[in-house]
Image (tube, rainbow, N blue to C red):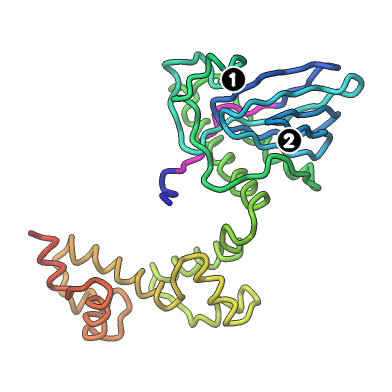
């Protein structure tokens, strides 16, 4: 699966208070949408399912999915919501504003409907720490306008806050076996920095930082990277060496030393094992 194609992009995020008994029916959003009920109550209807919504209700609606909102007639709900693409689509030629909702299925332009996320996301969940979620949402509230030269820099900031929110959202809604243990992100960031600065420590220091056993660390590491730790380190160093082989005239002996290999012989042996050719052959091929 090509996850490089997924770059979540928020078009519109806001707080929307419903009036007593207000309805919003037969909605088809061109982008995916997330709704957090911060106050009041109401109900959601979609695909024959009905959910009662009250504070802490978290709703995810995939792009194009028909749904209805009905506010309570006494204490109507308040939506904190966002509309976004998992992979950005530019619809400015078709819509004057980014809150793209169709209320007539026969008029829906399916070619402009955003692609779905590759894993199933639950439609309805409950969150306990409502304030945490609202704080994350409020950081990327946007006006219902496309970015321009005056708002471009601010939009970059809003998108960064949104990406932080999406990371938080996916970690909450997806099963643990879908994505790596969140602690591994910090460990990998540290390991990559240590590799770049030639300061790699014994593996023991990394799994002690996580307070897990060696065996469990190896399991988490492979789940996060697809490689055991030693192989990951070797591959990282080899990839850096490839850059020097391709773009510099540094000797192979210097390259081996620069990237932390014990000897040029070991470097050449490992390079051939991983790439099917020697460093010199790789350099000659890259410079042809």
Query: Which label sits in the foreground, 1 or 2?
Result: 1
Residue occupying the point 64% across, 34% down: 61
Residue 213 x, y percent position in the rendering: 62, 81
Residue occupying the point 51% across, 46% down: 118
Label 1, residues with CA under 10 Å away: few <14, some 14-19, many ≥20:
some
Residue 18 x, y percent position in the rendering: 79, 20
What quarter of the picture does the C terminus occupy?
A: bottom left
Horizontally, is 184 left or right of 241 in the view? right
How far apart in space, not on screen, are marks 1 and 2 (Cα)? 18 Å
Q: Residue furthest right?
A: 74
Type of secondary structure dominating the magenta stretch:
strand
Residue 39 x, y percent position in the rendering: 83, 31
Identify which residue, 94 or 259, lies in the foreground: 94
* Quadrant position of residue 98: top right
Horizontally, is 81 left or right of 187 in the view? right
Horizontally, is 258 left or right of 113 in the view? left
Magenta part of the chain = 6-14
**Circle number at residue 101:** 1
Residue 243 x, y percent position in the rendering: 24, 62
Identify which residue, 128 or 150, lies in the foreground: 128
* Quadrant position of residue 32: top right
Residue 201 lies within the magenta run: no
**Circle number at residue 36:** 2
Identify which residue, 46 or 239, lies in the foreground: 46
**Circle number at residue 246:** none
């Amino acid at each position: 699966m090509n996850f490089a194609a997924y770059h979540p992009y928020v078009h519109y995020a806001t707080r929307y208070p419903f009036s007593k008994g207000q309805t919003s029916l037969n909605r088809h959003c061109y982008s995916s949408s997330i709704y957090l009920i911060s106050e009041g109550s109401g109900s959601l209807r979609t695909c024959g399912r009905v959910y009662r919504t009250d504070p802490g209700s978290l709703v995810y609606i995939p792009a194009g999915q028909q749904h209805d909102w009905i506010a309570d007639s006494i204490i109507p709900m308040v939506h904190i919501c966002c509309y976004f693409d998992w992979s950005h689509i530019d619809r400015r030629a078709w819509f004057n504003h980014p809150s793209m909702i169709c209320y007539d299925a026969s008029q829906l332009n399916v070619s402009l409907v955003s692609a779905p996320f590759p894993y199933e996301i639950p439609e309805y969940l409950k969150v306990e720490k409502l304030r945490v979620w609202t704080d994350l949402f409020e950081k990327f509230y946007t006006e219902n306008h496309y970015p321009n030269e005056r708002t471009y820099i601010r939009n970059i900031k809003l998108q960064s806050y949104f990406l932080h929110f999406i990371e938080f959202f996916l970690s909450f809604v997806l099963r643990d076996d879908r994505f790596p243990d969140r602690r591994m992100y910090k460990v990998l960031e540290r390991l990559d920095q240590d590799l770049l600065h030639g300061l790699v420590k014994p593996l023991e220091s990394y799994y002690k930082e996580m307070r897990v056993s060696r065996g469990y660390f190896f399991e988490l590491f492979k789940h996060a990277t697809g490689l055991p730790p030693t192989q990951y380190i070797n591959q990282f160093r080899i990839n850096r060496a490839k850059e020097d082989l391709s773009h510099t005239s540094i000797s192979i002996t210097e390259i081996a030393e620069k990237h932390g290999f014990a000897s040029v012989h070991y470097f050449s042996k490992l390079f051939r094992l991983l790439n099917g050719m020697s460093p010199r052959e790789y350099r000659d091929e890259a410079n042809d």
